[in-house]
């Protein structure tokens, strides 16, 4: 049984997908996709030996080695140029996912969709997509086993589509699509963040060395969160 988190990630792959799952660990995602779609094929990339072996075992257990190629290596280095059309990177921090994409830009030529699920700091990915000429097409948020996850889908295109220029800083942080949907899970995530920010603000204001810049930033973020949660 695949986690709801990875099932949501998989739902953004097209039929007959030809994709890479980087940091695949047990290769659960590519196995799930290829078992449901006999035309799909995948490359499962892993930088660590243990997870690489787990991925090989899982793929062999499902007799999928003709359609899922498990490769040991760092980030997008496991790919040849123009080898895949979609890239999935899930279950890591946003900055690590961004660095993997940034260091592998030469492998993105034939990639028409990037699906990422950062565990923290989705903003770093939204910023990277915007700077690199990707449009943020969709965003979803879900809660599973007490954790809240965000899934972002980007395609080559107008990097500003979906954003409103006068509030882009806020949208890069909270997510332009998630902000519009403003659902219960989104509220849950940002209500907790608001409490944290309010606590940090109190601490910073009490500190002997007052950091004015930090206070201004925190107050701005707290105002945004209060508006969003109102
Ligand atoms: N993608 C799966 C998921 O979402 O359930 C596994 C996530 S697991 C927490 C992160 C995996 O990424 C680990 O197996 C780790 O070895 C791998 N990883 C970390 N950095 C990597 C890199 N630069 N290239 C390839 N794999 C990497």
Image (cartoon, grey):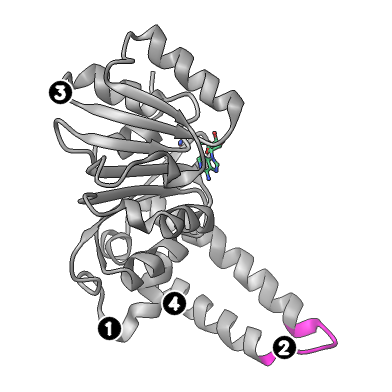
Residue 42 percent location from the top left of the image? 29, 29
The answer to whether marks 1 and 3 mark residues whose Cβ atoms lie closer than 8 Å is no
| Mark 1 lies on residue | 165
Front residue of 78/30: it is 78
Residue at disc 3, secondary structure: loop
Few, some or many residues within 10 Å of mark 3 (<14, 14–19, 20+): few
Residue at disc 4, secondary structure: helix
Please, is residue 188 above or below residue 30 in the view?
below
The answer to whether marks 1 and 4 mark residues whose Cβ atoms lie closer than 8 Å is no
Few, some or many residues within 10 Å of mark 1 (<14, 14–19, 20+): few
| Mark 2 lies on residue | 211
Predominant SS along the magenta part = loop
Residue at disc 2, secondary structure: loop
| Mark 4 lies on residue | 224
Q: Earlier in the sequence, mark 3 or mark 4?
A: 3
Question: What's the CA distance linking mark 3 and mark 2?
Answer: 57 Å
In the image, the segment drawn in magenta is 205-212
Few, some or many residues within 10 Å of mark 4 (<14, 14–19, 20+): some
Q: Quadrant of residue 187?
A: bottom left
Residue 230 in view here = no
């Amino acid at each position: 049984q695949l986690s709801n988190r990875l099932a949501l990630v998989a739902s953004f792959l097209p039929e007959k997908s030809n994709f890479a799952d980087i940091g695949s660990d047990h290769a659960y995602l590519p196995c799930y996709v290829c078992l449901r779609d006999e035309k799909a094929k995948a490359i499962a990339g892993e930088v660590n030996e243990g997870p690489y072996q787990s991925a090989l075992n899982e793929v062999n257990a499902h007799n999928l080695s003709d359609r899922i190629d498990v490769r040991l290596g760092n980030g997008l280095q496991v790919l040849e140029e123009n080898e895949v059309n979609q890239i999935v990177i899930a279950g890591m921090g946003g900055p690590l996912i961004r660095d993997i994409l940034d260091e592998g830009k030469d492998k993105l030529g034939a990639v028409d969709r990037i699906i990422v699920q950062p565990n923290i700091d989705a903003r770093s990915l939204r910023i990277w997509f915007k700077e690199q000429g990707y449009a943020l097409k969709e965003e979803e948020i879900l809660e599973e086993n007490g954790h809240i996850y965000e899934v972002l889908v980007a395609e080559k295109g107008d990097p500003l589509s979906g954003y409103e220029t006068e509030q882009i800083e806020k949208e890069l942080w909270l997510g332009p699509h998630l902000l519009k949907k403003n659902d219960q899970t989104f509220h849950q995530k940002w209500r907790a963040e608001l409490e944290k920010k309010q606590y940090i603000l109190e601490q910073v204001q009490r500190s002997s060395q007052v950091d004015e810049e930090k206070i201004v930033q925190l107050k701005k973020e707290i105002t945004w969160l209060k508006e969003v949660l109102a």
